[in-house]
Image: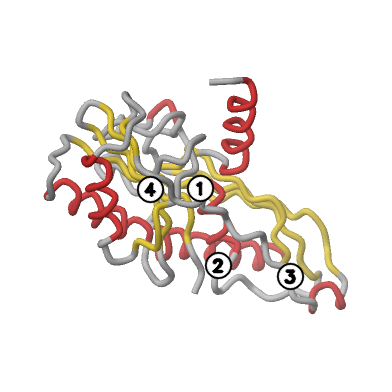
Amino acid sequence: MTANQWAQAVRTQLGIGRLLPLGGPADGSWITEQAAAGVLRRAAGTPPGVRLGSLRLSVADPDRAPDPAVPAPPSALPPGPLRIEADFAAAGDRPLLTVADQVRAALLEASVRELGLVVAVVDLQVSGLLDTDEAGAPQAPAPAPSGGPPTAPVTDERSGATQDGAAGIAAVTLGVAGVARLAPALGSSRPVRLTDGHALIQLATAPGHRALDVSAAVRQAVTAAPPAVSTVAVLVTAVEQG
């Protein structure tokens, strides 16, 4: 890898954030922090007059997190329960503890309903108070998560040549309900990586589909179809809006 390629890979990794476990250790699924945070920011039920600031996700207790059932994507976090850390500003016309409880409930509900994240802790911090005009103005939407570059020919990790095996896995994946597109984000344009019988598939989910359910359906479909692979991992790199 050249210096320019290495720099681009680092910039890409910083943009997508951490690779978070999606579901539990048996689910073989991960999601980028960028994609998950975008969904949480749009969480239905967040009280009006609240402005979310920073929002980060991490494994709550990485030392006690179990090993995944399948090989994880490079630099992915272990599949333990997550911690959500966020700050927010709100109008001072309501008790801030009540507002914090509403924000926490909205984040937890969206984590489960929209994504399938296992969340143990939601830490919130009040970053400021809004006046009446600020509280009534709509919050500017966060930038939509990027799913990476357009889909390129899928290749075998060892040879770099286009392979029927990876192409077949890509075709099966695209036929699964809830898959919007293949969306590579890990430092290359390969949405399907095959290494010694293990497949890593990077994809974007379609509106109205829970990310964990889509991932489970993809893993089941790819495992059942030729070419045979021994293990399958899915990385959700974008969650598309309706």
Whole-angstrom CA distance, mark 1 to mark 3, is 25 Å
Q: Residue at x 55, y 44 (%)?
A: 57
User: Which one is earlier in the sequence, the residue at label 3 or at label 4?
Assistant: 4
Within-10-Å neighbours for mark 2: few <14, some 14–19, many 20+: some
**Label 1 SS:** strand
Compared with 15, 98 (above or below) is below
Q: Secondary structure at mark 3?
A: loop
Count residues near mark 4 (Cα–Cα under 10 Å), then give few for <14, some for 14-19, many for 20+.
Answer: many
Residue 146 lies, in percent from the top left, at 56, 53
Q: Residue at x 12, y 46 (%)?
A: 226
Mark 1 / mark 3, whichever is N-terminal: 1
Q: Earlier in the sequence, mark 2 or mark 4?
A: 4
Q: Which residue is identified by label 3?
A: 139
Residue toward you, 76 or 130: 76
**Side of 109 relative to 71 (left or right):** right
Q: How far apart, in angstroms, are the residues tagged by discs 3 and 4?
A: 28 Å
In contact (CB < 8 Å): disc 2 and disc 3: no
The quarter of the picture where residue 198 lies is top left
Amino acid at pointer 3: Gln
Per the image, the residue denoted by label 1 is: 121
Question: In the image, which is nearer the foreground, mark 4 or mark 1?
Answer: 4
The kind of residue on which mark 1 rests is: Val
**In the rendered structure, which amino acid carries the disc numbered 4?**
Leu
**CA gap, disc 2 and disc 4:** 18 Å
Residue under pointer 2 = 43
Q: How far separated are the C-alphas under marks 4 and 1?
A: 16 Å
Which of the two labelled residues, at mark 1 and mark 2, occupies the earlier sequence position? 2
Element at label 4: loop
Q: Which residue is tagged 4? A: 22
Horizontal side of 69 relative to 138 (left or right) equals left
Q: Of circles 1 and 3, which is in front?
A: 3
